[in-house]
Amino acid sequence: MNALPALSATPRAPLPQPRAPLAAGAVLGRIGTLQVRLAAHEGEVHAAQEIRYRVFHEELGAGCHDAGSAEKRDFDRFDPVCDHLLVLDTALPGPVERQIVGTYRLLRQDVALANGGFYSEEEFELGQLVARHPGLTFLELGRSCVLPAYRGKRTIEVLWQGCWAYVNHYGIDVMTGCASFQGTVPAAHAEALSFLAHHCRAEGEWAIRAVPGRFQPMDLMPAEAVGLRAAMNALPPLIKGYLRLGARIGDGCVIDHDFGTVDVCIVLPVKNLDSRYVTHYAPDASRFTA
């Protein structure tokens, strides 16, 4: 797992007045037997961390630390201050904790500033990006994972119902965070990373770079050598989904040896969201957070 990020020395802009928090356990979306809501108590957070451990450590081979390995939970010091979005299959038997099939971790800007910064600041110059946008509210999304049997369209849709409802409730202006390729060799993903570098880079006011000392180039192939179809097919589903929504990608990738991944930075201003997805998710968001 990543070490704790250092506090950014970049000056921070004042934020709008924080909104009233969503109620613990608030339901934010529903498709069939799948329900998305916030964790209601510590037991549900622990169950989400167990899902993360099964996916990140047991399935994908992330490094196991003593505490997490003994308890078979993936956790760090950010978990107590984050909101935990849960996807539950209400048709599964047993207690609610056994119905959790996916999770997403959400860290709002006001909470991050009160608790030492964003998780992603260890890898990308997020503090500088935030400082360039005074008055806008950022949300960091991370630790996204879904159990293998539920990695389909409905689960992704209900997760985004929940995210969109959350974004609407808190008046979020920008979503950001890390997304990953498996393995620690960027060259193994040369075509996909080069596609992102040449065609999807965040520019101008939204430009962001990997931190000095960890920056790895992404433009490993010239633009004319990149096959667009092959590159798209090589993108992880999460990154492909972010791009469909209208996200852009930061400059440079970072090798995370603890998790065995190559990370890129996602930047998604809410105003840039593809109108098709706003139309699709907005009615449900309004219904569940009214």
Image (cartoon, rainbow, N blue to C red):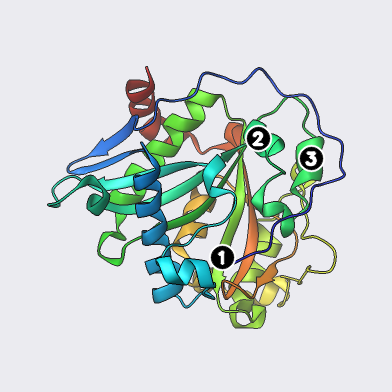
Q: Are marks 2 and 1 in contact (CB under 8 Å)?
A: no
**In the rendered structure, which disc, 2 or 3, sits on the residue that comes first in sequence?**
2
Where the C terminus falls, by quadrant? top left
Name the residue nearer the viewer: 162 or 115.
Answer: 115
Q: Is 238 on the left or on the right of 220, as rendered?
A: left
Name the residue nearer the viewer: 148 or 69.
Answer: 69
Secondary structure of residue under mark 1: strand
Where the N terminus falls, by quadrant? bottom right
**In the rendered structure, which disc, 3 or 1, sits on the residue that comes first in sequence?**
1
Badge 3 local density, few (<14 within 10 Å), some, or many (20+)? few
Q: Are marks 2 and 3 in contact (CB under 8 Å)?
A: no
Residue 2 in the image: above or below residue 80: below
Residue 265 in the image: above or below residue 226: above
Residue 21 in the image: above or below residue 7: above
Three-letter code for the amino acid on which mark 3 is drawn: Glu
Instruction: Tell me how far mark 2 sits from mark 1, CA to CA.
Output: 22 Å
Instruction: Tell me how far mark 3 sits from mark 1, CA to CA.
Output: 24 Å
- Where residue 185 sits, quadrant-wise, is bottom right
Residue 250 in the image: above or below residue 19: below
**Label 2 belongs to which residue?**
109
Q: In the rendering, at what x and y percent does residue 214 appear? A: 78, 69
**Can residue 112 be seen in the rendering of this structure?**
yes
User: Can you tell which mark lies on residue 180?
Assistant: 1
User: Can you tell which mark lies on residue 134?
Assistant: none
User: Can you tell which mark lies on residue 205?
Assistant: 3
Q: In the rendering, at what x and y percent does residue 244 appear? A: 49, 49
Three-letter code for the amino acid on which mark 1 is drawn: Ser
Q: In the rendering, at what x and y percent does residue 121 appear? A: 73, 52
